Image (cartoon, coloured by chain):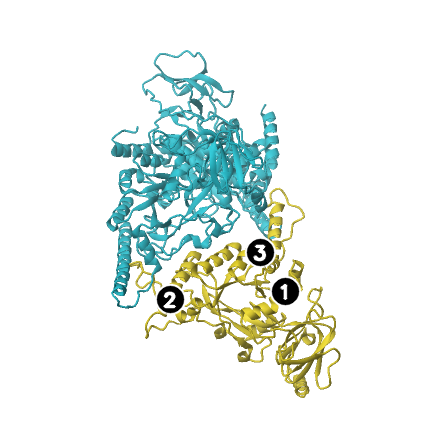
Chain colours: A yellow, B cyan
Amino acid sequence: MRALPALLLLSSLLPAPPSALLRADDWLALRGRLPGREQPETLLIQDGRVVGSVPGEAPDGYQRVGADTLRIYPLWIDALGPLQVEFSEDGRFADYGEDKRENAPAASEPANRRGLYPERVAWQALTREGKEPAEAWQDALRRGFGLSCVAPGGGILAGQAVVVALPPPTLREAVVAGPPAIWGDLQWHARDYPSTHIGAQAQLRQFMADLQWWAQLPQPRSFDPALQAGQGLLEGTRLWLRANSAGQIDRALSVAAELDIEIGIQGGSAAYLFADRLARQDVPVILRLDWGEAPELPAEVPAWSRPLESWQEQLDSWQAERGSAAALAAAGVPFAIGSRGAKREQVLPRLRSLLESGLSEQQLLRALSGTPARLFGLDFLPVELGAPGSLAAFTVLDRPLAEEGAELRLVMFGKHWHDFGEDR
Amino acid sequence: MRARTFLLWSLLVCASTAQVETEASRRSQMQQHERLLLRGLRVFTLEDGPDGRPLSTPIEADILIEQGRILAIGSALEVREDTPVFDLEGCYALPGIIDAHSHMAIAGGVNEGTHSITPEVRIADALRADDVHLYRALAGGVTTILQLHGSANVIGGQASLLKLRYGQQGSELVFAGAPRAIKFALGENVTHANRSERGGRFPASRPGVEALLRRAFDQALAYQAAWQAHLDGLMRGRAGQAPRRDLRLETLLGVLSGEIRVHCHCYRADEIEMLLRVAEDYGFRVAVLQHVLEGYKVADKLAAHGAAASTFSDWWSYKQEAYDAVPHNAALMARAGVLVSLNSDSAEETRHLNLEAGKMLRYGPLSVGEALAMVTRNPAKQLGVDEQVGRLRPGMDADIAVFWNHPLSSRSRCVLTLVDGVVRFDDRDGPRAPQLAFAPQAREPLQLDPEAMAWAFVGADLHPVSSEPLPAATLLVTQGRIEALGYDLALPDGTQQLDVAGCRIQPGLISGGSYLAVREIGSVAGTVDHNETGSFQPDLEIAGALFAPSRHIAATRVAGITSALVEPGSKRFAGQSALIRLRGARREDLVLNARFAEHLQLPRFPDDVRDERGLREGQKQLEALKQRFLQVRRQQSRGAVLDRREQVLLECLDGRLPVVMHADGARQILAGLELAAELGFHPIISGGASAWKVADSLAVAGADVLLGPIESLPSDRWTPYDMPFRNASVLAAAGVRFGFRTGSNWDGNARNLPYHAALCVAYGLPEEAALRALTLDAAEILGLVDKGRLEVGLPADFVVSSDNLLEVSARVLAVFVDGVPISLHGPQEELAREAALRLFGEDER
């Protein structure tokens, strides 16, 4: 409370930062309704932690935010956020040991790690410098997620993700976790080997064999950061594989079974077709919100045109894919939500559409908070919302999520919070 | 008479055919029953007969299926009341067809072509189970396919054997328990002989291919030795460091140990022998030679090695190494003791592999059972799954294809396909030809006496086309013309009487579009003359480049095709086509009409009604095309001097030179009609794949259509699987006149023109209409006034065949081309004869 006037004063003197970041260094009272509660209440927050709640107004000494009509939800976690880190191919390791015009070696090249970069960490390429990154962070912040997973792309094994807090005071402070997981894509391919999906999978298979071999090598052994970082795959580190279509999901599940590795699915449009198998194999899913608009049926079609039924078929397929969340929930498959690829203004409407497609609010909230927290090992987040002593981690809307027109009001993560009422 | 028939067809076609195919409609056919009785079938079991060959006569029987397997085959089988029964009276059942060479349903690249050696990649890793081609294959009776890696590398990837359980996920399609297989390749593809990057990587020659194989196996053996040393050390208590596992070399060791079967893409006899030598040197057996188009030259060596062969029925000439291919290849190899299968290597051809087998009755001779075995039992053996599939017997998988007519008849079609007892394709109510007897005759070509004054073909069924058929009549030819046809003819002295009782005589067939004599070997640019650079070449005359010694002419006419339209390529203003007769030593001997028509490639239009931009672009291009013509008219009216190209356009505008408009899309065809109406052309459409959508417009415009190739895939996934085959019926019902063409993709097989038409018959086109389209209608469209019919006084231009020429099994016994009997012994027959002489010591001629 004491720091606040100074901050406000500063903000009136200085040009407004791109994000109206406020710091709740001291005491804050957040008023609104928690899920499942009949009445609004006031959460009392000191130093970024909940110290208690009262049914009425906050005692003196607290900065008051919120209102009876607000809905306080557990902090949403963007399991595949819009901040993108795309690593380029590492061309240092030739896949031919000799001039390819002289010979075609039958042995695979031990140094060929093309597309296999588990040692890379998204942190290495994360930046807020420059106009575009700054805008990207702003965009990420305004989606309603207080934590966002920044996953790398650019390889069969693209690297490791980090979870960043939104809004971030500094880049270093922003990173709250480096989840022990590797992100990958069996559809990745290069100009040279591997240039196909079959090549990519063979490359991964050889890598798994190399991991085992390398682990047994006596010291000193050659330094191989990829094999070092990849060891986790042998010990249960999850590999999040990009897989949207039925074929891709089927392939990912088959790879997991064959190589005996833990995987997750990122994408999952066609996951509704695999709900039972995903449950059986205990494979979690990150469903993305980046679907296109529903195909529009033309009013009539001339004789030369594609038949009307073709659009209807596409629409049916589109609608079926929208049912993936409900199908996974029904089958007991843990799933989270990723907003990558969706536009900011699409996020809330699309979350609502998941409710319309059969998901309960409780299931959706679990997908937005509890499940990703567990999947990424974010054990600093509270198990029970508003419990005394727990971290203040909330996403607050101006009305229930299910209601048309609900908008983001506030995101709070510990001492950091952002009131969107101010700069929406 | 004709109008009434059209009306009847129209009713038939409309009553029983779908115009749209969706995933829902495909899946609605799929049914799974614990038990199912297929009743009233004629069953080809493909079991051995008393002579040790597969049975050629079907047994009248029911088939009872339980839990995915055949429980019983027998007459009047008793079943529980609640057992579903499919009444299939008169239909033919055979084991589900097995295509031993396919590239369907593979995601993300068929060929890891970045290395010359990639045995570690596995096709099964990237299955695309929703590939609609799988459904279309089911609709041809196919139940199992071998998915092979591409042929860009000497040692390619591992193959995948699939059961076509369409509707399930990729991993559920894999044929459980099938032996592992790998693709090798030799020849032009692996040496990049036909690619610009040739020389960029080893090997670039056939000797290089052999060296690569040997070096690779040496490395694999060295790897094995290193592991053995390590294991020996462990046995002796010496804990050493294990060598790195190399999955590429381990796969090669699997080849050497025989655990992984080698399927090798190959063509020429020398490279085939090389591979067998290498294999024998390294102690493994080549399981199956794929393509193996010159296998007939070394069939004895294949047999001695124990290599099987999986080949095409009649593809040839698309590459230099395919130039010596002969359609007798499969039969010659089989006679030499090689286990032979026929494959498609094509999502289109896999849909009628039964007809590819049927061709063996013609080029063999093989028995019905032997021919059917080439697409069922033999590939099952080659793939190591013959205890599960490939025959029909209790205990085997209920993979069954049911055909409406005899499966080797061109007029047959698949109506029902089961995989593991599950109905995966069901079109029992679809359009089809009448059920007909199938009795192919093993007649030998007639020996025409060249000294005879006249030839009388006695006792044949004459099909004049322009008049009613004359059963068991006589055709008399004197001085190159039809002297008489009918009964009790007076034969002049010196007439050679030829007994052709039970045979047919019909006019010579006319191709409405081919690249005959202007495209000898597809991959050899120096032999390809139908394409020019640029897009405005209306004055090019294809007739100037006709290559009379072309092997294609001989190969095509022995199938009964006596005249053909030779097209220029596919540019906007492509040039002028020529009409040729299929005989002659010199260019001018071939020419019937050196300048038949100017050929235009019409602009493409999107098929999406909402794609306004694409439609505007198409319209813009159409307008530009039209303006080319109109500008010439304006220049002429101003008295301006026209250059050669413009003069051709003026000829078109004045009606002195017909215009053929190439168009397959429906909107594209309508654009052609619009253009013709505005410029005053008589509309002739070539291609016409989507003509069925706009048949009424074509009829109203009085347009002619040169339809084909019929052996084409539907243009999109909503076009019914059989629409390419039903297209002609729809046109016929609408009263549109059409001929058939094989077109650009089939330059090596212009001879298959009658089978393109036959597929239309199998799917509802009346047989008389098909014959008329192949003869009289084509002649009328092309302005060949004395062809396409048998009439007194016309030049003798006809075909004597053992059976209906639409049947792939029909043998051509004699051909007259424009008054001259031609030899049925062409270069391909000579190659086959020489091989037979070497292999069996007998003259096949």
Above or below residue B567? Residue A66 is below
Front residue of this view, candidates B451 and A382: A382
Residue topped by disc 2? A212
Q: In the image, what residue type sits under mark 3? A: Tyr
- Nearer-N-terminus badge (1/2): 2
Q: In the image, what residue type sits under mark 2? A: Gln
Front residue of this view, candidates B379 and B433: B379
Q: Is residue B654 visible?
A: no
> Are callouts 3 and 1 both on one chain?
yes
Marks 3,1: beta carbons within 8 A = no
Q: How many marks?
A: 3
Residue count near mark 2 (Cα–Cα under 10 Å), binned few <14, some 14–19, many ≥20: some
x then y, percent, for residue B264: 34, 47
Which residue lies at the image location 63% right of the left edge and 43% below the top edge? A302
Residue topped by disc 1? A364
x then y, percent, for residue B704: 54, 34
Q: In the image, what residue type sits under mark 1? A: Leu
Marks 1,2: beta carbons within 8 A = no
| Drawn side of residue B281 relative to residue A74, left or right | left
Q: In which quadrant is the N terminus of chain B drawn? A: top right
Front residue of this view, candidates A127 and B660: A127
Label 2: state its secondary structure: helix
Q: Quadrant of residue A221?
A: bottom left
Chain assignment, label 1: A
Q: CA distance from mark 1 to mark 2?
A: 40 Å
Residue topped by disc 3? A272
Residue count near mark 1 (Cα–Cα under 10 Å), binned few <14, some 14–19, many ≥20: many
